[in-house]
Amino acid sequence: MSGMKETAISEKPMDTGQPLLEIKNLKMHFPIQKGVFRRITDYVRAVDGASLAVKRGETFGLVGESGCGKTTLGRCIMRVYRPTAGQILYHEDGRTVDLCALNNEELKPYRRKIRMIFQDPHGSLNPRMTVLDIVGDALRVHGIASGTELEDRVSDLLRRVGLRSEYLRRYPHALSGGERQRIGIARALVLEPALVVCDEPVSALDVSVQAQTLNLLQDLQAEFGLTYLFVAHDLSVVEHLSDRTAVMYVGKLVEFADTKALYVNPRHPYTEALLSAVPIADPRMRERGGRIRLEGDVADPAHPPTGCYFHPRCRYARQRCLEEEPILRDLGGDHGVACHFSEEIELRGAVMVNG
Amino acid sequence: MNTQGPLLEVQDLQTHFSTDEGVVKAVDGVDFTIRQGETFCLVGESGCGKSVTAFSILQIVQDPGRIVRGSIHLRQDDGQTLDLAAMDPKGRALRRIRGRDIAMIFQEPMTSLSPVHTVGDQISETLRLHAPIDKLQAREQTMAILTRVGIPRPERHFHAYPFQLSGGMRQRVMIAMALICRPSLLIADEPTTALDVTMQAVILDLIKELQGEMGMSVMLITHNLGVVAEVADTVAVMYLGRIVESADVYSLFREPKHPYTTALLRSIPVIGLTKQERLATIRGMVPHPFNRPHGCTFHPRCDHFMPGVCNRSLPPITHLEGGRTVRCFLYGGADTREREER
Ligand SMILES: Nc1ncnc2c1ncn2[C@@H]1O[C@H](COP(=O)(O)OP(=O)(O)OP(=O)(O)O)[C@@H](O)[C@H]1O
Ligand SMILES: Nc1ncnc2c1ncn2[C@@H]1O[C@H](COP(=O)(O)OP(=O)(O)OP(=O)(O)O)[C@@H](O)[C@H]1O
Ligand code: SF4
Ligand SMILES: [Mg+2]
Ligand SMILES: [Mg+2]
C-alpha cells in the first residue's frame, strides 16, 4: 500500500501483489434517536473515514481502542450494514466490485468468499441450533454438501479447531466460552473463503488452545492462500500473526506499517501508549513503570474532538493539533501515520522480552 | 500484599451436569481459599470448569448442573461463616449475598445485561436492590461509576441500550454494575478480555484501588497470563475440573511444577520473540467429556508420563514449601517407587 491518499492508491499498483480488499474513506454513522417520536438527534460516527488496503494472502492486523469502530468496519465489509459513505473494493480476477453498491442478491456470491468470525461468540450463535447445524448450515445453504458428507466435513473441521465430534449434537449453552469461540471459527472457515474478517477470534481461549488455533489459521492460510483481516486486543497475538498492522482511533486509522516496524518504531502517540500498556507475563517486570496513562476522557464518537481526535489525551499535543486534523500520510517504506509531528517526536516501541 | 484471614474457603467442590449422553463432571473436586484483600487468579484450559466454579459459588449454575458435593464457606462482616453450597439457590438469603457481598462480572456481558433496559436503569436498579437510597441518589452514583470505568459521556450512555455499545463498552458497564455495591468479593470472569490494553490497565488499576479502599478480594478468571503476572497474589491452575497446581504468582512463573503449567507458560506469545513461525502447543486434545482418562487426567498429553503410575490412580494433592500445592506424581504420592523431579 502506498500511502492512504486516495490518488496514490488508484494510481500506483502494489509492489507486492495487488490488494484483495481496498477500503476507501469508509463511513458508518449510526443515528441516535430520542424521545417518543424517535427523532434523530445526532450520529455516532463509528467509522469515520477509514482507508486501508489488504493484500492477497496476507494477514492484516487491526488494533485500537475498544469502541473505535473495528467491529463496525468488519460488519461493513460483510455488508451487515450499508455504509454511510465510501467504498469497499473487492478485487478478483482483474475485476473490481464495490461491495457498498451491491444489493442483497448481488452480494450472495461474496457472502461465500468473505466470512467473519464474530467477536461475541455467545450472541452470534443461534441457541436453538446444534453445533452441527450452526457449522454446517452454510454448506447446506450454498448447496455444497448434505447428509453424512456434511456431517463428516463438519466433524473434520471441529477436530481441526480442537473439538471432538461429541460436540456435534450439543447446543451453544452447553459449551464453555472458548468452545463457543471455536464453533464460530469453524463456521467461518467451513466454506473455504478467500477473505476472513477475524474479530477477536482467540480472545476466549487459553494460551495453549490459542496457540493451536493460531497455528491452524496459519496452516490454512498457507494451504488455501487465505487473506485475514485480524482484529484483536492482544498485541502479542497480533504481532505474531500479522504481516502488517494498522491502529485505529475513533473511527479512523491513525497508523499502519509493517508489523515489526510498527512495534519497534511507532510513529503515532496513541500507538506508543498502546504498546506501553501491554502486560508482560513475568511478575518480576511488574514495577518496570513506563506505562503511559492516557489522561482525559475516552473520545465520544458522536462528538469527536476538534483537530486531531487524539489531542485531548496526547502528551505531545500542541496548538496545531486542536485546530487542524492530521491526514494519514506516507512516511515512506509503507509506513503511514496521521500525526502532525511524527518527524519531531521521539516515541518508544514495545518492551521486547528476549528470553 | 497485606492479606488477612480467609474470606472464602472452597472444599471438595463438585458440580456435575447430567445430560442424556452422560455426566459432565465440569468441576470435580476443587479446593481453594481466597484471603481477604487478595487477588486470586484462576487459569486453565478453556472448558476446564473455571466459569462453572464461579457459578457454583453464587449457586447460579445452569440446569442440569448441580453441586453434588463440597462446601463453600464465606466469612461475613460479623465474623460468621455461611456455607453457600448448603443454601437454597432461590432463597432470600442467597439473593442478598449476590450482588452485595459477592458480585460477578460475567465472561459474556450480553448474557447478563437485559436487552430491553437501558444500562443506567440496570445499574441503578442493582444498587437500589441492595441499598436504601432513592432514585436520584442511585442515578448520581451510577453516573459516577460509569465515569470511573471510562464510559465517555455517561449522561448519554445512561440511556443507551446494550446493543448500542461496543463489546468493550458493554464490558465496562458490567464492571460498573458489579462494583457499585462495593462487594467484599468480586468474581471477575475474563473482565478485560474485550478491552484494549490501555483500558484494561485502567480497569485493573480501578479494581486495585477499590481493593485498597475497602479490602475487597478478587477472584480473577483469565486466559491472559500477562494480566495474571501483573495483578495476581495467588494463582491456581485448573485442568479438567481440578486444580492441578497453586502457588504465589512469583513462584509459579519462576518455577512451575505441574507439567500442564509448564506447557501452558510455554505457549504464551511474547512480543519480540515472534517469527518463530510456530507457537508451542500441548499435544493431543482435551479428553472426551464423559470418558476421562484414568489416574492423572493429564497423562495422555504429558511429557513426563510414567506408565503404570500416572494412569493408575489420581495423584493426591502434595503440599510443597511456600504454601504451594501440586497434583502430580513427580512430587510424590505414587503408590509405587517415588521419583525425583527430572
Ligand atoms: N448498532 C449500533 N447503533 C448505534 N451505535 C453503535 C452500533 N454499533 C456500534 N455502535 C457504536 O459504534 C462505536 C464503535 O463500535 P464497534 O463495536 O465497532 O467498536 P470496536 O472497535 O469493535 O470495539 P471493541 O474493541 O470494544 O469491540 C461505539 O461507540 C458503539 O457504541
Ligand atoms: N449446560 C451444560 N451441559 C453440559 N455441559 C456443560 C454445560 N455447561 C458447561 N458445560 C461443560 O462444562 C465444562 C466447563 O465449562 P466452563 O464454562 O466452566 O469452562 P471454562 O473453564 O470457563 O472455559 P472457558 O475458558 O472456555 O470459558 C465444559 O466442558 C462445558 O462444555
Ligand atoms: S501425574 Fe504424571 S501424567 Fe500427570 S502431570 Fe504429573 S507427570 Fe504428567
Ligand atoms: Mg469489536
Ligand atoms: Mg469460562
Image (spheres, rainbow, N blue to C red):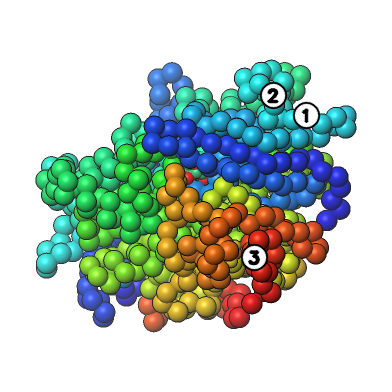
Of pointers 3 and 1, the one earlier in the residue sequence: 1
Q: B192 or B281: which is nearer to us? A: B281
* Chain designation of label 2: B
Residue at 15% from the left image edge and 64% from the top image edge:
A92
* Chain designation of label 1: B
Q: Secondary structure at mark 2?
A: loop
**Disc 2 with disc 1 on a shared chain:** yes
Residue at 42% from the left image edge and 74% from the top image edge:
B278
Residue B107 visible (yes or no):
no
Q: Amino acid at mark 3?
A: Thr
Q: Circles 2 and 1: CB distance less than 8 Å?
A: yes
**Disc 3 with disc 2 on a shared chain:** yes
Residue at 33% from the left image edge and 56% from the top image edge:
A159
- Give the quadrant of the C terminus of chain A: bottom right
Pointer 1 residue: B82
Q: Secondary structure at mark 3?
A: loop
Pointer 2 residue: B87
Q: Secondary structure at mark 1?
A: strand
Residue B336 is labelled as 3
Q: Amino acid at mark 1?
A: Leu
Residue A223 visible (yes or no):
yes
Label 3 crowd (10 A; few <14 / some 14-19 / many >=20): few
Residue B213 is labelled as none
Q: A161 or B257: which is nearer to us? A: B257
The correct choice, above or below, for A125 with respect to B325 in the image is above
